[in-house]
Image: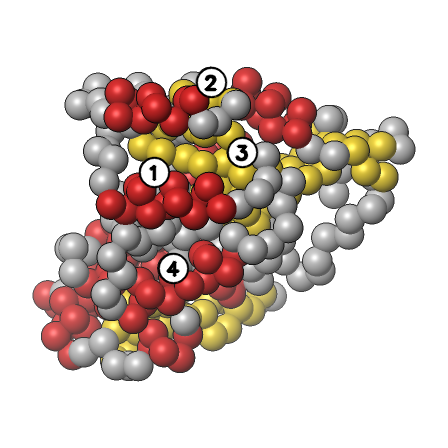
Amino acid sequence: MMRYNIDMIKIGKVLLIGRANVGKSTFVNNVIGQKVAITSPKPQTTRFSIRALYEEERGKIIFVDTPGIVGKAKDFLSKRINEKTLQILNESVDLVIYMVDATRKRDFEESKVLGLVRKISRPKILVINKIDDPGKSFLPQYKFLEEEFKDVFQISAINNMHVKPLLDKIFEYLPEKNIDSEELPPDMVYPLINLDSKIFLGELIREKIFLMMGEEIPYTTTVIVDQVVERKNGTTYIKARILTTNDRYKGMLIGKEGRKIKEIGSYARKEIALAINKKVFLDLNIEVDAHWQEMYY
């Protein structure tokens, strides 16, 4: 962990809230400088709240990346994700970042999120993301919000456009504390401070399912890592299971002659090896469990 030669630094917790796929996880990943949250173009990519530590000479920011709010949650998993996000909103934080996507229309879902943001009695910053997208922009639909928020930033999280001024403003809001006033939890995957290594590795594998499978299958699956062993030859052995809800989806995940599961495993292994900077042996299997959502979420 970094140490500083001063007694007081800025330390605080910053909550990110917004619809699914507005770019919250991409923003956190790029600010931290490494992947701490998985990303994909599909909703429900983020299912867990991610707490990640950003450190520099000015101080420490704990970013709390929440799963995206689903406007009309009908299935069990969407309802559970919404419930977990609502619980997080009651946490004590120093600042709230409300992120919207300039490439998407304001709709019922956005109004629902805005209603939740308005109820939070903490300082807030409005961040309008994806302003460099060459496609259609709905930026005028969000202009009225500039009267409601004292600080408004237009950024591109994926390209780090205007992110530095936003960081400067975040530090302005954070309180000064003694440098040793906050101890980080043990056994976490630094800079993540709320997920253990098995959950983090499972999320990296699940990301590949979201990126490589069709629209339906990712929402029927989760990944459980059962074993992580450091072998004497320096290789990290990881035993993991993809759980899905029925045999049809299992067959699609396996693919013809086992090609799809091999492809998912290959990309996941490379991603994990890059993340932990070690050789990886990934033992990946698929199981059917119709009740995995109730058990793990």
- Upstream in sequence: badge 2 or badge 4: 4
The residue labelled by disc 2 is 162
User: Which mark, residue 82?
Assistant: 4
The residue labelled by disc 3 is 124
Label 2 neighbour load within 10 Å: few <14, some 14-19, many 20+: few
Cα gap from disc 3 to disc 2, whole angstroms:
18 Å
- Upstream in sequence: badge 4 or badge 3: 4
* SS category of the residue bearing label 3: strand
Q: Position of residue 138 (x, y in %)?
A: 23, 25
Between circles 2 and 4, the one closer to the viewer is 4
Between circles 4 and 1, the one closer to the viewer is 4
Q: Amino acid at mark 1?
A: Val
Cα gap from disc 1 to disc 3, whole angstroms:
17 Å
Toward which corner of the image does residue 178 lie, by quadrant?
top right
* SS category of the residue bearing label 4: helix
Between circles 4 and 3, the one closer to the viewer is 3
- Upstream in sequence: badge 1 or badge 3: 1
* Above or below, 70 relative to 281: above
* SS category of the residue bearing label 1: loop
Q: Position of residue 50 (x, y in %)?
A: 51, 52
The residue at the point 42 percent across, 63 percent down is 83
The residue at the point 85 percent across, 32 percent down is 8
Label 1 neighbour load within 10 Å: few <14, some 14-19, many 20+: many
Q: Amino acid at mark 2?
A: His
Instruction: Give 120 or 93, whichever is nearer the viewer.
Output: 120
The residue labelled by disc 1 is 22
- Quick check: can you spot residue 169? yes
* SS category of the residue bearing label 2: loop
